[in-house]
Amino acid sequence: MSQNLELRRAILSLARERGPDKTICPSDAARAVGGERWRDLMEPARDIARDLARDGVVEISQRGTVLDPDAGWRGPIRIRAIG
């Protein structure tokens, strides 16, 4: 299984486990998949979160504000499962 697919599954699983009222950090998924090399997976995890947000499966937020997945944002983000 590719790392991107593993990251996608980890993001969805972790976000759904937390429920629609709570969020996860992309690092949660990166750590679940990458172990000690989780930092190498941070950018791919953020990219996959963008894709999932475009598909309407998750919301990405920053400081409580929902972000447009196509905008040029930077900095810490949170991921929340929708529904």
Image (tube, rainbow, N blue to C red):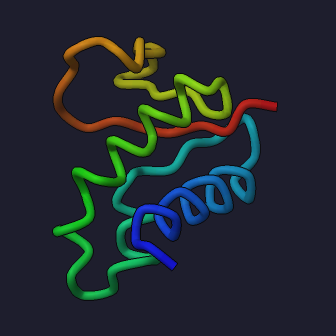
Would residue 16 be found to the left or right of residue 68 on screen? right
Considering every residue shown, the one lying at the far right of the view is 83
The quadrant in which the C terminus is found is top right
Depth check, front residue: 55 or 80: 55
Residue 29: x and y in percent read 45, 64
Depth check, front residue: 27 or 4: 4
Q: Residue at x 33, y 80 (%)?
A: 34
Residue 2: x and y in percent read 44, 73
Q: Residue at x 33, y 41 (%)?
A: 47
Indicate whether 55 appears above or below 1: above
Indicate whether 35 appears above or below 16: below
Would residue 71 be found to the left or right of residue 26 on screen? left
Indicate whether 45 appears above or below 33: above
Residue 67: x and y in percent read 41, 15
Considering every residue shown, the one lying at the far front of the view is 1
Would residue 22 be found to the left or right of residue 41 on screen? right
Q: Residue at x 53, y 23 (%)?
A: 54
Indicate whether 71 appears above or below 28: above
Depth check, front residue: 81 or 47: 47
Number of marks in picture: 0
